[in-house]
Image (tube, helix red, strand yellow):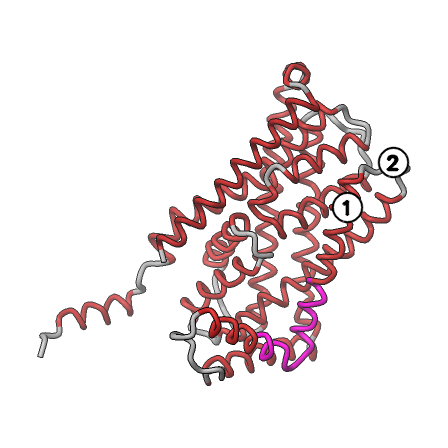
Amino acid sequence: MSAYKYLATRKAFYFMFVGLAAFILYLYFFAGFGKIVTILRGVNPEQYAFFYTLAIAAMLLTNFFWLLSWRAVLNSLSVKISVKNAFLYYWTGYFVDLVVPCETVCGEVTRLVLVQKETKDDYGFIAAGGVTNRIIAYMIVVTGLYVGAGLLFLKSTIPPVVLTVFVFILIGASVYLGFLLYLAFSEHAADRIATIGLSIMKFLRPKKYRSSDLSPEIRESLSSFYVGFKTFREKPRLLTKSFLYLTVSWLFGLTQYVLVFFALGIFKESFAFFIIIYFLAGSLTDVTASFSVGTLEIVLASIFILYGLSPAFSGITAALVRSVTFWSPLIMGYLVVQVFGAKRLLAPRPSEKTEISTKDSTPNS
């Protein structure tokens, strides 16, 4: 398993390197390194340091309120975890989301396993909490994307690459939200998906997955999964706190982009402009993770040019935006995984240590 994780991480960083190389070539041919250096020399260092620090703080608060929302949803299902552990589990899952392009599924599964390991609660309830929180978040995202689409289409000239990417993300996010809602409102949705997944695994690994039927444990978890959604459908007020947390998270997320522009001395852009780039960048990062490196920077730079910035200024701004919204969370998640993941998250608990030592001390028959 460790070798597989190492190989996957290695490939992800390889794609990041290729993406960065592509972005550097873009800057060289379309912006010009000489013009970039000239612009950087004109940036006020005190102003840059102040607003960039605030942007990093806004990034941390964005994710903090997101994890508070996730924890609140879990608490509503009687799955209790502390804020400290929610912090550790969230950032571990977020790091996986940023590295592995699997539409936030891998991060949710990582958090699911970590929470179940601590609480011993049913996987179904924990999964229902995670998916419910994701539904609320994506309702906000899809709404913002449609607003952004309307604002973007009002522009007289739209670069084809920007239009294509935005439409693709809009359709993808809508389909994804529809899939999540299907899980929440259809009693047999999770059962059907699990059955399909088992059939695929049986085809790929027939020796390990011989039975076509779901085990009793899986069926029990699927039942709990649906009961969790039923709880929120019958008592939607339980989601009020989560909705408020995610709204605050959204506001801080939007603020990151504003503060980055302020750091470079750009104060003229409209609120509509920031709405567009926030939802576009966030959605593309969710979908493509490490594959977004390079591609998203070029797309953002193209949008900035559309709104009147010079190619050189656009390239610098795109790089700075991504340093706050992608690279800083990636580093943060990596540190959490390295410092806490290996030593605390994966270490046996006291009861498990006692059980292991008891087995070790038992003489062989």
Q: Is residue 92 left or right of residue 41?
A: left
Q: Is residue 191 left or right of residue 10?
A: right
Residue 174 falls within the magenta-colored stretch? no
- 311 relative to 167, above or below: above
Q: Which residue shows up at 43% across the image and 44% down it?
A: 10
| Residue matched to label 1 | 164
Whichever of labels 2 and 1 marks the residue nearer the N terminus, that label is 2
**Three-letter code for the amino acid on which mark 2 is drawn:** Thr
Picture quadrant of residue 293? top right
Q: Is residue 54 left or right of residue 213?
A: right
Percent position (x, y) of residue 283?
Answer: 68, 50
The crowd level at tag 1 (other Cα within 10 Å; few <14, some 14-19, many 20+) is few
Q: Secondary structure at mark 2?
A: loop
**Magenta stretch bounds:** 176-193
> In the rendered image, which quarter contains the C terminus?
bottom left
Percent position (x, y) of residue 349?
Answer: 31, 64
Q: CA distance from mark 2 to mark 1?
A: 13 Å
| Residue matched to label 2 | 157
Instruction: Tell me whether the residue at label 2 lies in contact with that at label 1, contact meaning CB atoms closer than 8 angstroms.
Output: no
Q: Is residue 196 left or right of residue 118?
A: right
Foreground residue, 159 or 239? 159
Percent position (x, y) of residue 343?
Answer: 33, 52
Q: Which residue shows up at 58% across the image and 38% down it?
A: 56
Q: Secondary structure at mark 1?
A: helix
Picture quadrant of residue 222? bottom right
- 2 relative to 303, above or below: below
